[in-house]
Image (spheres, helix red, strand yellow):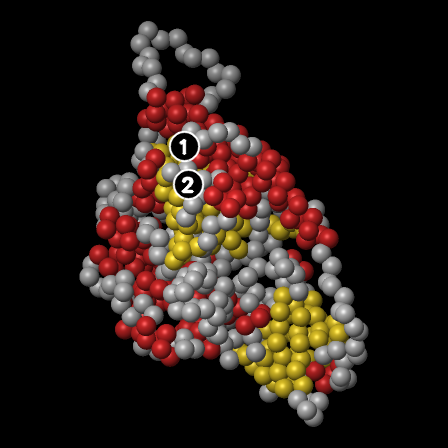
Amino acid sequence: MKTRISLLSAVISVALLAGCSEPQTTTKKEPATQSQQNAVALDGKIRTTAQQTLEAFNIPGLAVVAVKDGEVILAEGFGVRDIESQAPVTKNTLFGIASHTKAFTAAAIAHLVDQGKLDWDDKVTAYLPEFKLSDPELTHRLTIRDLLSHRSGLGLGAGDLMIWPNTDKSVDEIIAGIANVPIEHGFRAQFAYNNLMFLTAGEVVHRVTGVPYAEYIKQTFFEPLNMDESVVGFSNIPAANDNVAVGTIEKDGELHRFPLDYLEDFGGAGATAGSVDDMGHWLITQLQHGKSPSGEQVFSPESQHEMWQLITPIGVSDKAAEQGTFFQGYGLGWFVKDYHGVKQVYHSGGILGMLSLTTLIPEENFGITVVSNQQAFGGLTAITQEALEQVLNLPDQDWVAEQSENYRQFMQRKTDFKIPKPDTEEDATLAKQEYAGTYTDAWYGDIDIRMQGDELRLDFTHTPMLKGTLTHYNGDTFIVHWDEPLLEADAYVRFELNEDDAIKQATMEAVAPFTDFSFDFHNLTLVRQ
């Protein structure tokens, strides 16, 4: 059951019935309160911006939910959920919210803290004795708080190739692989976004409760919050539900349909599919200090205070300071910063072909989630920022124009990108077929290189989407061009030879600067078997 339509929502709906004359009545009409008038204005601004965004950013479809003072003031879809079927987006359309899942993972831990079943500063090995980082000392120091705040010492996206694009690895295999992912930073020394730590946190939930992560989120949040469309794991979407968004990717000015299963492997790091109708309940719960719209306390105000504290600082640019932000960082499952004198709590999420952005302003009791089936993040930013202008009474700025220009410049840079020519051109040391073989990385596993006809083919054996053809670049360096060009993740493969001109190992590195950080090829050391 969904929350009943509030009086405020009814006022907004009536106000937006363009062209309809007011019925004659002898009943005296009560004047709208200032808060109702503000809500109508905010609703109108969000709708207008959403419609503008579809065209300005070449976005097929998006959905928005906004809440204010404990009420949903807007929950609506715009455009189409699938460029093939042209079916419309509605407030009930499921989108992959990706890394916003991290907020649910932190809340699940908070729920267990409230019950006295664990503590934020408990050691991870107390619940996962097999857990290891590549540094034994860090292994025994790492706490649950560290898992949730991106300060483990692992690098940006390190180890993501075990889960991105989807692999056949189990959670146990992924956690075992973490022991061999290289440490890049000092422990708790700096922020480095890492998905594997949140996947590990999801497994902590499983071990403590005996309930699989996806089911625990369903029981603890989705059911009491009446989020009856949302699921963790694409495979858990009921077969009868076809109101599901399909991702699209823009390349060279054209949109390409890109079906994907919403990060099934990401677990506690990013596997949730949700509708904006459901997300409205989640936003209200956050703004009510853990109390659901129906009045159930799903986590305590004290735990929420912990989640919204800045734990891991992130540097602030001069431009950010000019736009009202002087500090920012990561809490537990949320980014936090100041914005024009108020606290902003937020999180984004991204998968191939789909994005999400959630923003909360606790002092104004306001929250908004925007989801889209295209990768133009500036569109979500524009809708959010226009809403914040209204809520915070900020000077007018044309966010659609500014963000769309940034997006077009970025897309043009991608179109114009050319693989740089080597300084000197050298032939390969060996005959092409001699580079073939099985190569093993300690944390990913086997990568096969085989001759197919007169071509070298590279196969990430655990990742169905990572298959491609090797072409010679220079010397003993090749470039793998993936069969799926929309990955935009072609990579150098550099073979290292020993003194006898036998292949010892190979390393990889993304070719383009815009390749998603989750293609962490640079962390691989491929030893020839």
Q: Residues within 10 Å of mark 2 (few under 14, many from 20)?
A: many
> Hey, what amino acid is under mark 2?
Tyr
- The answer to whether residue 91 is left or right of residue 36 is right
Residue designated by label 1 = 392
Q: Residue at x 35, y 64 (%)?
A: 146
Judged by depth in the image, the label closer to the viewer, 2 or 1, is 2
Residue 75 spot, x, y in % from top left: 43, 36
The total of numbered circles placed on residues is: 2
**Mark carried by residue 339:** 2
Residue 459 spot, x, y in % from top left: 63, 74
Q: Residue at x 66, y 45 (%)?
A: 409
Residue 386 spot, x, y in % from top left: 49, 34
Task: For the N terminus, give its image quadrant.
Answer: top left
Q: Residue at x 41, y 77 (%)?
A: 135
| Quadrant in which residue 107 is drawn | bottom left
Question: Circle 2 — which element?
Answer: strand
In the orientation shown, which residue stands out farthest toward the top?
A: 26
- Depicted 305 relative to depicted 340: above or below: below
- Would residue 451 be seen by someone viewing this image from the given angle? yes
- Would residue 199 be seen by someone viewing this image from the given angle? no
Q: Give whichever of discs 2 and 1 has the lower sequence position.
A: 2
- The answer to whether residue 121 is left or right of residue 337 is left
Q: Residue at x 42, y 41 (%)?
A: 339
Residue 272 spot, x, y in % from top left: 43, 54
Marks 2 and 1 in Cβ contact (< 8 Å): yes
Q: Residues within 10 Å of mark 1 (few under 14, many from 20)?
A: some
| Quadrant in which residue 519 is drawn | bottom right
Question: Circle 1 — which element?
Answer: helix
> Hey, what amino acid is under mark 1?
Leu
Mark 2 and mark 1: Cα distance apart in space = 10 Å
Task: For the C terminus, give its image quadrant.
Answer: bottom right
